[in-house]
Image (spheres, rainbow, N blue to C red):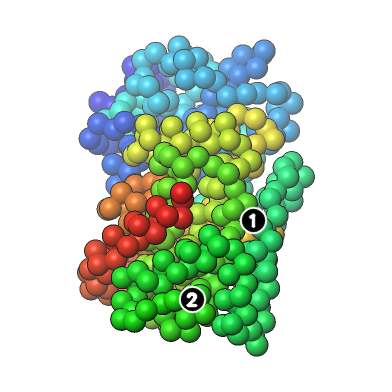
């Protein structure tokens, strides 16, 4: 059985039925959820809190983030997260990281989020790293009898049928709490130029040539095997008119210039080296997908290039926490970025807003910088599987590109995606994936070289 001893005795004493689902041994709860093959939305979890009055268990959906402000409003207590060491003292019969969300079995008071109270079926860890429990909602309510219910989580994707936390709401909080970087002057000038429908290639070239570094990057890009241009490229204007085109040059230049707003380390899975590699590969794939999906190639490229800007903003605002997140990412490659971000940013109430994930944070910055709507939405929603809404094709293209790149260990997380569902959402056949894989193989050396030059 995949149950901790105290939980097994509690359920037997209360005659509460459940099903024990065996899985391969998992390194953590994220991995266990994936290994189960069950819908993530059906899982619940326990978060342990403490203050001078003692420990409390909060039970909420696995795909939600605990809101300490909401907990304070409900209880009047300034509860903070338990450390891992404190947690294991209370749950000594459980495998580390696998805390059952049944507080009564451990004589703990329990808070229950309203989404859990309404669930018809739930899954959760029973304290073991090689199994999960399935329980009907009515039986869970028996197990949680005497608990206090209420609104406990930040409202984001996947939290019932209530409205999600909007980018505007998060943006307001971020602007109140932190000094967000303005768009760099050159990037702003490029953005304004692209908004002018009468702008010429000469005007764009002259603007880029004010910056020797940007000029060199554009020339390197135009001369790469990505485009197989047979002739010589001797100026930015030639790169625009003969090879890349106005929109592509503008988007590449905009992305390069925008990154200068941030100062983050080069090394590590989340460092600038890997950021550029991930961004360039994703941009290339989105651009390649655009003709299949009947959308603008230049805009698709920009969505892929800028979708992960939230990581840069997190690193810019919180360098110490970003260093911790980088280390956790390397130590836990099987965990989701969402769970790691919660672990790093879930300790201080002022930072709880960051638990919406780096995607939403990037979308906020893009909105403040007045970038195109598909770019905003692709950044904001690229972490949310099953997205439906505005600019859906662009979001799904970014998600599909990221899913294909995970097999090459490119990106910031490697847990599997549902590629067939993404293809279906875009109206594409599986054969498209084979074509894209061949294209990536062809251009990989050039993309790697460009990424190295951009991050140096």
Disc on the earlier residue, 1 or 2 = 2
User: The residue tagged with tag 2: helix, strand or loop?
Assistant: loop
Residue at horizontal 48%, vertical 58%? 382
Q: In this orientation, which residue lies closer to the viewer: 234 or 188? A: 234
**Residue 283 x, y percent position in the rendering:** 43, 65
Q: In this orientation, which residue lies closer to the viewer: 128 or 399? A: 399
Residue at horizontal 43%, vertical 39%? 267
**Residue 342 x, y percent position in the rendering:** 53, 37
| Residue holding disc 1 | 365
| Residue holding disc 2 | 235
Tell us which disc is closer to us: 1 or 2.
2
**Residue 371 x, y percent position in the rendering:** 63, 67
User: The residue tagged with tag 1: helix, strand or loop?
Assistant: helix
Residue at horizontal 29%, vertical 33%? 26
Whole-angstrom CA distance, mark 1 to mark 2, is 33 Å
**Would residue 402 be found to the left or right of residue 308 on screen?**
left
Q: Say above or below: 435 vs 366.
A: below
Q: Say above or below: 348 vs 281.
A: above
Q: Say above or below: 412 vs 403.
A: above
């Amino acid at each position: 059985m995949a149950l901790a001893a105290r939980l097994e005795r509690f359920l037997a004493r209360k005659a509460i039925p459940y099903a024990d689902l065996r899985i391969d041994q998992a390194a953590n709860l994220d991995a266990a959820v994936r290994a189960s093959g069950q819908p993530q939305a059906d899982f619940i979890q326990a978060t342990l809190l403490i203050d001078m009055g003692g420990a409390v268990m909060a039970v909420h959906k696995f795909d939600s983030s605990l809101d300490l402000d909401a907990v304070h409003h409900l209880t009047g207590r300034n509860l903070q997260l338990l450390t891992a060491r404190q947690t294991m003292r209370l749950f000594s019969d459980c495998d580390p990281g696998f805390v059952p969300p049944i507080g009564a079995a451990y004589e703990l008071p329990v808070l229950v989020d309203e989404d859990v109270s309404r669930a018809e079926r739930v899954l959760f860890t029973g304290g073991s790293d090689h199994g999960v429990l399935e329980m009907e909602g009515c039986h869970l309510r028996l197990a949680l009898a005497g608990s206090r219910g209420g609104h406990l989580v930040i409202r984001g994707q996947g939290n019932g049928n209530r409205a999600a936390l909007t980018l505007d709401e998060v943006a307001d909080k971020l602007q109140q709490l932190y000094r967000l970087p303005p768009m760099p002057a050159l990037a702003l000038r490029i953005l304004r130029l692209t908004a002018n429908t009468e702008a010429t290639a000469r005007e764009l070239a002259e603007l880029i040539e004010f910056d020797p570094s940007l000029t060199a990057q554009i020339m390197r890009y135009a001369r790469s095997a990505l485009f197989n241009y047979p002739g010589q490229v001797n100026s930015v204007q030639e790169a625009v008119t003969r090879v890349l085109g106005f929109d592509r040059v503008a988007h590449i230049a905009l992305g390069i210039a925008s990154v200068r707003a941030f100062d983050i380390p080069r090394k590590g899975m989340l460092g600038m080296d890997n950021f550029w590699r991930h961004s360039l590969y994703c941009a290339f794939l989105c651009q390649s997908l655009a003709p299949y999906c009947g959308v603008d190639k230049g805009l698709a490229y920009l969505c892929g290039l800028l979708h992960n800007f939230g990581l840069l903003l997190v690193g810019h605002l919180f360098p110490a926490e970003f260093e911790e997140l980088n280390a956790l990412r390397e130590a836990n490659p099987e965990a989701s970025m969402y769970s790691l971000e919660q672990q790093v940013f879930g300790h201080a109430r002022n930072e709880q807003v960051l638990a919406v994930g780096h995607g939403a944070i990037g979308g906020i910055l893009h909105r403040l910088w007045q970038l195109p709507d598909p770019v905003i939405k692709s950044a904001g929603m690229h972490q949310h599987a099953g997205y439906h809404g505005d600019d859906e094709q662009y979001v799904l293209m970014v998600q599909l590109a990221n899913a294909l790149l995970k097999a090459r260990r490119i990106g910031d997380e490697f847990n599997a995606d549902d590629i067939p569902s993404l293809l279906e959402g875009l109206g594409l056949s599986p054969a498209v994936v084979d074509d894209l894989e061949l294209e990536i193989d062809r251009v990989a050396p050039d993309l790697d070289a460009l990424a190295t030059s951009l991050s140096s």
